[in-house]
Structure formats: structure tokens, C-alpha cells
Image: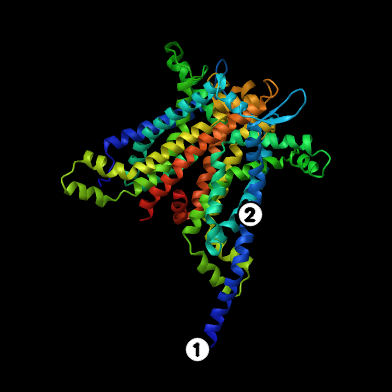
Amino acid sequence: MTAALPRADVAPVASAKRRRRAPGWLAVLPLLVFTAIAFGLPAFAILDGAFTVKDPATGAASYTTANLTGSLQGPYLTALLGSVKLSAVSAALGALFGLPLAQAVVGSRSRALREAVLTASGVLANFGGVPLAFAFVATLGNAGVLTAHLGLKDSGWDLYSFWGLVLVYLFFLIPLMVLTITPALDGLRSQWREAALNNGATGTQYWRHVALPVLAPSLLGGLVLLFGSAFAAYATAAAMVGSAVPLVTLQIADALSGNVLVGQENVALALSLDMVLVAGLVMAVYLPLQRRSARWLDA
Amino acid sequence: MARRLTPWRWAVLGLAALYFLIPLGASVVFTVDVPGQGVTFDAYTRILSTDGFVSSLLLSLELAVATIAAVLLLMVPATVALRLGAARLRPVVEVVCSLPLVVPPIAFVAGIVTVLKWGPEHLSRTPLFQTFVAIQNEDFPVVLVLAYVVMALPFVYRALDAGLRAIDVRTLVEAARSCGASWPQALVRAVLPNLRGALLNAAFLTLALVLGEFTVARLLGYRPFAVWIYNVGGSQAQMSVAVSVLSLLVTWALLLALAGAGGGRDRTASSRG
């Protein structure tokens, strides 16, 4: 315990330090190379194609902004605006319904309830896509169970519409909101409420002046995340409405499948670039907000 | 804070339960109560024998296994290295793993379609062309694995990062190293067992992503599980809904198994990730 230990202790640490730099770089390198190829090439293709027009006669390619201006006109603009409107409405409703649900779960003492709701949220937030669309078609579609039993058809109900899509999107947006906001609600200290009440505040005042300001970054972050999630959704809409509701994702898919004019592929890429810009904006708002709200959780 | 179940709380939970359970319940009713035939479980019994079910499900599972293996092989060494010595690379990795969030799947697949066209257009006389053909093999489309790995990066990064935050990697590795373990040994036998929950979490999220993925697969013209459900939906409504219900139940079972295997501490770490 006198002479041998220090040496045995120091030597590996020193050698570990010497080797550390090389393994560090080497371990990250495969990831960077992989993303450069699997993500970088398609990303470059979008950017390149969005600004390229190919002359049908000569096959010569030239750089232009015609695709981008084309993607912001006529039916494409309608689709883009339709997507933005649908995402904004469903995100707002998702946040509106998700917050009380999360609060009901966080506020209850029952651990089983909390676990059950969070686990269910984890499943349901991922339950987008084709199965979700079919479940709703079976419930509220033209031949759906509820449509038939409640006679909804006569009252003008139509699942394959804007509000039908909102109803379906909420099925994965509300759980997503619950998952996003629950850690922030957990971060609300009971001492803050007690302090506010001791100083004579009412419950409403506590919420308005203490809880909501603390929650604001998380709420806004959740809202933005929901917007992005709804904006990018394709499978649910494709399986449910076909093209009854104009959405940018459906337009891109149509243009890519080649059932429109030749040369529309590049308009599809321009539309993709539009989507990337919107999604980029969403992330530019979301990530700083998330970091800000994380401060309350780690404290 | 008043921590009890007030009537208000029950009302919120009740409404939520109604909204989330009715479509599932109605779907089950829809599959067993066929107009003109009465109650029948035909939709469920026919699934296995329906053309394409087994092959598409197998394809999806193979893709999932390959994606999980690839994404963990890429991400585990990278995230561990960030904790050990390459902390300066953290912003780079963080940005790289967040980039896929900025490109929606439909835009991503538009880019992939364009890249794949470069093969026949520009590279037909180079050896690279063979690579382009190979990754688009119908039996096992590697291009889908590449796409899914990219799409899984954000989730896997978050899951692993949350798991690593909960343990002291540096101490673990140095303890293992001073006991004479080599670098791979230290990683596999000291770090990975402590990351079990995070690894399972990452694997599950990737599995859910691949099994449900529709956009990329459909637009590239492959037929894994989700595309098969979609195709069947046109002609056999009852069965497509039956498969949808079953796929939700299977996902649920997987998540519960994960929660059981992960243990309490890991679960809280992962649910925050």
C-alpha cells in the first residue's frame, strides 16, 4: 500500500490519457462518414435539384429559381398553406388538450396511473401512419361503426376532410404533448405553490404568475414540436384522404410517383426544400426552448 | 400541492380514455361484426394465409434488426467517446443527430430518389453502379436500412445520451482499465451492462420506427409491413383493420416487455430523454 500502488495507479491513467484522443476521434468518425453519405447525398440532391431545370430538348441542365417560384404558386401554394393550416390547428388543439391531461397525471398520487398514461403515450405517439388511419376509417369513416350506429352521415359528418384529419392527428399529437410537457410539470416545485399561497395568492394567480411563466418555454417548445410532427406526416393522410385535402406531403408524393408531367420531379424537390425550410424554422425555435426548459429540470 | 384525485381530474382522464379507446374498440367491432354475416372472426383467421403477409412482415423484421444493429454500432462508440475524451466533438454530433429532424421523411425520400437516379444516369460505367444496384436489391433493400438509420439517429442519440448521463462512464472505464481490461473489454463488460435500459429503449424506438415506416418504403417501391397493410386496405377492409389492431397490440406488448426489463431507474432516465 506504499510504493507499488501509486505507480500501478498512475500508469494506466497516463496511458489512457495518451490514447484517449485517438479513440475519441476514431469512434465518432464512422458516424460522421455515414451521415455524410446517407444523409448528405440526399440533402445535396434536394438542394441541387430544387435549383436545376433540365431542358427537355437538349438535356442541358441550368441553374434557376423557377422551380422554387413554381412551388409557391397555384395548387402547390394551396397545398403548402393547407399543410401549415392543418398543422397549426392540430398543434394548438393538441397542446390545449395535452396540458390538462398531463397535469391530471402529474397531480395524482397514483404511481400506477402515471406509469400507465406515460407508457400509453409512448405507444400512441408512435401510432401514426397507416394503422391509425384505418382504425379511424373503421370508426368514423363512411362505413364506420360509429357513423352507422349514431347516424352521423345524415348530420353531415365527413372523416375525409380537414377536421377529420385534425381529429385523427390529435390521436398522436396529444400523447406527444403529454410526453413533452410531463417533465416540465414535474419540475414545478410544490414549494413555489406554497410560497405563492402563503403570500395570499389564489390558485388562479399562482397559475398565471408562477406556473405558466415557468412552463412557457416547454409549452411553446411542445407546440412547435407538435406542429413539426403534423407538418411532416404523410402516411396517415395518404391512407385516409388520398388527395381530398390538399397537403404538401401528398403533392410531393404525387410528383415523385411520376403520375404528373415530366420535369415535375424538380418541383417536388423544390417543395421538399420548402418543407425543409419550415421544419428548420421549427427546430430553430424548438431546440433553444428545450434547452431553456431543461434548466428547470436539472436544477 | 394538493395531490388527490379531484372530480376535475377524473373528468379529464375519463374524456381522454374515451377519445383514445373508442377508435380501438370500434375497430375491433368493425373487424368481427361484418354486415350481412353477423359476428365472425374470419378477418383474423385469414391473416396468416393472405398473400404477402408473412413475407412483408419478415422483410420489416429483417430491416428492423439490421437498422438496430447498424445504428447502435455507429452511435454507442460515438456517444461513449463524447463522454470520455472527445467532448469537443459533442456539438458536431449533436447537430448531425438533429439534422434528420429538419428533413421530413417525404423530403428525405425525394432526395434519395434523385440520388438513386444518378446511378443509371451518370455512373453506369463505373464500379459504383454495382453498389447502386446492390443496395436496391428487392429481397433486402439496403437503401431502406440506410434511410432508417438516418431517421433513427435523433431518437437513439437522445436515449443513449440520457442513459450515459445517469452513469459515470469515465470512472467505470478507468476502473476497468486499471484492472487490466482492454478498451473493447471495458466498453462491453463495464459500460454496456450499465446502459442496458438506454440500449433497450433505443432499440425499441428504432423497431417501432421501422415496423411502422411507410413513406420512404412506399415511394421507393418496396413492400414492407406498413405498405402491405395499405395495399390490402383497398380490397379487404376488415382484414386491414384487424392487422392494424394487432400491430398496435404487438407494439404495446413490446413496450411493456421493455419497461419490465429496463427496471425502475432506467425507465425514469429514458422517459426524460
Q: Nearer the viewer, residue A148 or B219?
A: B219
Q: Pointer 1 indicates a residue of which chain?
A: A
Q: Position of residue A193 (x, y in %)?
A: 24, 47
Name the residue located 53 percent from the left edge and 33 percent from the top edge.
Answer: A232
The amino acid type found where label 1 is placed reads Thr
Q: Is residue A111 visible?
A: yes
Residue that label 1 marks: A2
Question: Farthest residue toward the bottom?
Answer: A3
Name the residue located 68 percent from the left edge and 43 percent from the top edge.
Answer: B62
Residue that label 2 marks: B73
Q: Nearer the viewer, residue A52 or B229?
A: A52
Name the residue located 50 percent from the left edge and 88 percent from the top edge.
Answer: A2
**Callout 2: 10 Å neighbours few (<14), some, many (20+)?**
some
Q: CA distance from mark 1 to mark 2?
A: 43 Å
Is residue B163 positioned above or below A12 on the image? Answer: above
Q: Nearer the viewer, residue A211 or A21?
A: A21
* Relative to A100, A55 lies left or right: right
* Relative to A256, B1 lies left or right: left
Q: Position of residue B19 (x, y in %)?
A: 41, 29
Q: Nearer the viewer, residue B265 or A189?
A: A189
* Relative to A233, B54 lies left or right: right
Q: Assign a secondary structure to mark 2.
A: helix
Is residue B172 positioned above or below B107 on the image? Answer: below
Q: Is residue B238 visible?
A: no
